[in-house]
Amino acid sequence: MITLKGDNIYIRALEPNDLEFIYAIENEEAVWEVSNTQTPYSRFLVKQYLENAHQDIYEAKQLRLAICQDRDFPALGLVDLFDFDPKNNRAGVGIVIQGKDNRNQNIGSEALGLLIQYSFYHLNLHQLYANIGTENEASKALFTKFGFQCIGVKKDWNLVNGVYKDEAIFQLINQQF
């Protein structure tokens, strides 16, 4: 099991008992805009996903980890590597913290820092990128805090509630390689 510890949180591999948490977060319509989700997920589909979550990142081309605060395993959020490209040593990054009470508590910041360290030092990635809606000030601040730079804006990229919205791409290059 992958476990990466910070001062106040740790990120870990998904477990079968994460079913209800993932079901809830995937069906939270407020999250759909940032996750490019269009339809709800059934418990059956989430259960199937969890049954295959053991796949190696090289096989699945993605890695989803739960963000936790204590040893009782309840997850507060998810952090993802997606579009893993081992040939070019890069991956996309996504993060979501469930519940407004858990946001602005440094949870996302600590989780992102742990994921960046894991990506650069264990997976030997050269770069990470994040797609962020230009109106999402909290995410832009979070990623720029870690050195991600906005390298461009995709105009009218996402259709949200009948309105086209711009999306920025942020990139972090591992300078040690």
Image (spheres, rainbow, N blue to C red):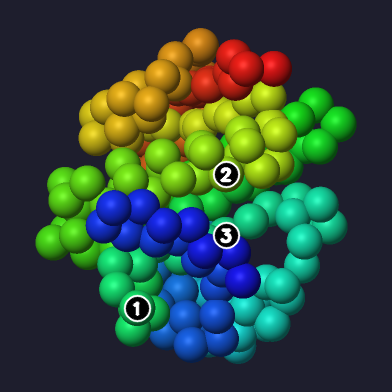
The quarter of the picture where residue 50 lies is bottom right
Residue at 84% x, 57% y: name it.
59
| Disc 2 to disc 1, C-alpha distance | 21 Å
CB contact under 8 Å: marks 1 and 3: no
Residue at 59% x, 30% y: name it.
128
Mark 3 falls on what kind of element? Answer: strand
Where's residue 96, x and y in %?
A: 38, 53
Q: Which residue is mark 1?
A: 71
Q: Quadrant of the C terminus?
A: top right
Q: Nearer the viewer, residue 87 or 45?
A: 87
Of label 2 and label 1, which has the lower sequence position?
Answer: 1
Q: Quadrant of the N terminus?
A: bottom right
Residue at 13% x, 61% y: name it.
101
Residue at 77% x, 61% y: name it.
56
Q: Which mark is residue 64?
A: 3
| Disc 1 to disc 3, C-alpha distance | 19 Å
CB contact under 8 Å: marks 3 and 2: no
| Residue type pointed to by label 2 | Tyr
Q: Which residue is mark 2?
A: 118
